[in-house]
Amino acid sequence: MSIVQRLATEAVAAVLSGRSLTTTLESAVARHAELAPAQRAALWDLTHGTLRNLGLLRAILRQVLRRPVKEQALEALLAVALYQLEFTRGAAYAVVNEAVDCAAQMGWPWAKAMVNALLRRFLREREALLATARADALGRYSHPRWWIEKLQVQYPHEWQEILDAGNRVPSLSLRVNRRRTTRDAYVARLQAEGLEASAHGDDGVLLARARPVAMIPGFAEGLVSVQDLGAQRAAGYMDLVPGQRVLDACAAPGGKTAQILEHCDVQITALDVDPERIARIDANLARLGLRAQVRCADAGAVDTWWDGLAFDRIIADVPCTASGIVRRHPDIKWLRRSEDVTALARASARLLDGLWHVLGPGGKLLFATCSVFREENRDQVDDFVGRHADARVAPLTVGGGQDVQLLPDDSHDGFYYALLERR
C-alpha cells in the first residue's frame, strides 16, 4: 500500500502545481506496470477522494499546523493520509506508519516526527477538528471560495445542492449502441451476469456499481459506450434527419460523434485541435463500427479546414470551465481560477462566431457546455443572438423549451443546451 500512497501523493501534488489529474494518473500507471488491479483502483480512490474533499482536509491542516507547509508535495502527503484516516477502511496505524516512511522516501526525513504527531493528533481529536473545519464554507463544501460565492448569487435556492452533488462519488452510466442491440436487451444481459443496472431514457443504462471499462460486458464488442446520462441528451436535441451534413466541432473523445451516427444516417465531420485526442475518436468509432470524417483542426479557424459546403447541423460542445462535471474530475475545482470563467466564455464566443459562417440557412447549431456558470451558458447565448441578426434561439426538439440547464445530481452531471437556428 505504501507505493499507492506515494503515487497518490505525487499525483495530488501535480494537481496542486497545475497539472491534470487524468494525465498524471495515466503517466503514473504507465511507469508502474507492476501495479495490480486492486492497487490501481486504490490509487484512483485516494487521488479522487483527496481532491474531492481537499477543502475539508486543508481546513483540518490549518488547525493542526503551526505554520503553512511550504513544500506542496508534503501538503499533498498530509492530505492523502488524512483522507485515508477519515474516509477509507485502512488501519489507522498502517496509514500513519506509511505516511511517515513516505515522508522520508520523498526527501523530507526532518518531517517524519511532524507527520506522525499531526496524524495521531487527528485521530485523538477527530470530532472536534472536523466540526471546526466544517464550520467554514471552504471546509463544508470543499470548493474554492470564489466558486461557492458565484453559485450563491446565480443559484440562491440550489447552490448547496449543486456543491454537495459535486462532492459525491458518481455512478457509471452507459449509452447503448442502438445499431447493435437495444437498451432492454442489454439491461437483461447485465442482470443475467449478476450486475445491478437500471434503464434511463432511450439508450441510457446506469450501473449500480462502477467497474473498469475492460470489465463492462459488451464494451469491447461495441455494444455500449461510457457516457453521462446528461451528455446523452445531445443527439435528441439536434433534430437530425438522414442525409444531413453534420459537424461535431469539438469532437474528442468521440462520444457525441458516435451517438449522432448511432441515431441517424448522416454525413458527419468530426474536428478536434489535439492530435492525441483525435486518435481516441478514431479508436472509439472503430470499436463501435461507425465511420466519420475525422480531422485535426481548430474549428474556429474556419479557413484552415472548411471546404465551402454548408452544414445542416452543428454541435458545438465549446471549451468551458467544466464546472458541471467536478464529481468525476475533482481536480477541476482546484485548477480553475475565477478569471477563467470570462476567458473561456470569450474563447467560446470566438468559436461560435466562426462556426456560424459554415451553417447553412435554416440550419441549426446545438450549443452545449458541461458548465453550470451563467456566463458560459445563457449569457453566452443572449450575447450571440445580439451579435447575429440572422440567429434565433429555437425550441429544443425534445422538451420544447428554449434552453436546458441541467444541474448535477445522483444520475447525471451538469450540462447546458441551447439550439440556435439560422434564419
Image (spheres, grey):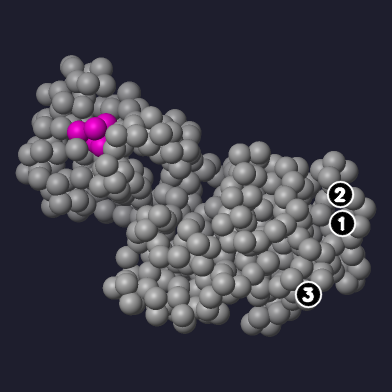
First-in-chain label (2 vs 1) = 2
* Residue range highlighted in magenta: 2-6
Q: Amino acid at mark 3?
A: Pro
Q: Is residue 85 above or below residue 423?
A: above
Q: Amino acid at mark 1?
A: Val
Q: Is residue 309 left or right of residue 165?
A: right
Q: Callout 2: few (<14), some (14-19), or many (20+) C-alpha neighbours within 10 Å?
A: few
The label nearer to you, 2 versus 1, is 2
Mark on residue 242?
3
Asked if the magenta segment contains residue 3, the reply would be: yes
Location of residue 17 by image quarter: top left
Q: Main secondary structure of the magenta part?
A: helix
Q: Assess whether mark 1 and mark 3 are in contact (beta carbons under 8 angstroms).
A: no
Query: Given contact means CB atoms under 8 Å apart, are the residues at marks 2 and 1 in contact?
Result: yes
Q: Is residue 7 magenta?
A: no
Tag 3: Cα neighbours inside 10 Å, few (<14), some, or many (≥20)? few
Measured as percent of width and height from the top left, residue 111 is found at 19, 21
Which label belongs to residue 358?
1
Picture quarter with the C terminus: bottom right
Q: Residue at x 18, y 17 (%)?
A: 109
